[in-house]
Amino acid sequence: MAAKVKAEGAEPKAKKEGGKLPIMPILGLVLLMNMLIVGKVFFMNGSAPKKGGETAAHKEVKPEVGEKITLEEFMLNLEDPDDRFVRCTVALGLKKAAKAKEIEEKEIAPIRDIILTVLMTRSRKELRSEAGRKKVKDEIRDKINAEMKEKPVVEVYFTNFATQ
């Protein structure tokens, strides 16, 4: 009987409702934090990272082309077993601050030599493709700029181009 009295006097155990954390508000906060971090990365840096991990904010800006120098025609043999040659006219797009007259007077011989050297090491097949000509233009620009301390050349243009 004593056991019965104890059972009657004891209150049933109440369930603890404060022990579980609400999952939905926590998930909402986590998602909100992720969206804020992703938003900061994309919008504060200017754009999403490109293939090489480079963003638009870190990309080198190409200077605007000012004056242009058109060089005399080139006609030279290519590095082909068939004795092929190229006949072309090259123009150089200079930075706005560069002085075309000064470059024409003092630097024209080394510039022509660089262009001749680059073109003579190419085959007709390389020069016939657009990608090949782009590569040659970039190489000419880079080699001329390496020779001149002010790095005046922004673009190289082929204004006339024929291979045979």
Image (cartoon, rainbow, N blue to C red):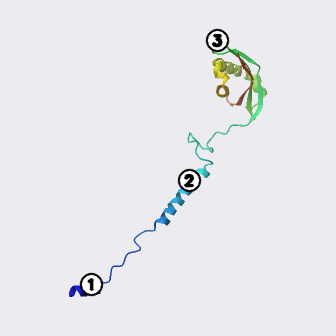
Frontmost of labels 2 and 3 is 3
Residue 81 appears at what percent x and percent y? 62, 12
> Are dots 2 and 3 in contact, CB under 8 Å?
no
Q: Which residue occupies 64% across, 22% down? A: 126
Q: Secondary structure at mark 1?
A: helix
- Amino acid type of the residue that numbered disc 1 sits on in the rendered structure: Ala
> Are dots 3 and 1 in contact, CB under 8 Å?
no
Considering only vertical position in the picture, is 22 above or below 155? below
Q: Which residue occupies 38% across, 75% down? A: 16
How many C-alpha atoms fall within 10 Å of the one at disc 1: few (<14), some, or many (≥20)? few
Front in this rendered view, residue 82 or 7: 7
Q: Secondary structure at mark 3?
A: loop
Q: Secondary structure at mark 2?
A: helix
- Amino acid type of the residue that numbered disc 3 sits on in the rendered structure: Asp
Q: Which residue occupies 63% across, 41% down? A: 59
Q: Label 1: which residue?
A: 7
Residue 9 appears at what percent x and percent y? 29, 87
Could you tell which of marks 2 and 3 lies nearer the N-terminus? 2
Rendered image quadrant of residue 90: top right
Q: Residue furthest left?
A: 1
Rendered image quadrant of residue 13: bottom left
Q: Label 2: which residue?
A: 38
Front in this rendered view, residue 116 or 5: 5
On the rendered image, what quadrant is the N terminus found in? bottom left
Q: Label 3: which residue?
A: 82
Disc 2/disc 3 C-alpha distance (Å): 58 Å
- Is residue 152 among the parts visible in the rendering? no
How many C-alpha atoms fall within 10 Å of the one at disc 2: few (<14), some, or many (≥20)? few
- Is residue 28 among the parts visible in the rendering? yes
Frontmost of labels 3 and 1 is 1
How many C-alpha atoms fall within 10 Å of the one at disc 3: few (<14), some, or many (≥20)? few
Residue 3 appears at what percent x and percent y? 22, 85
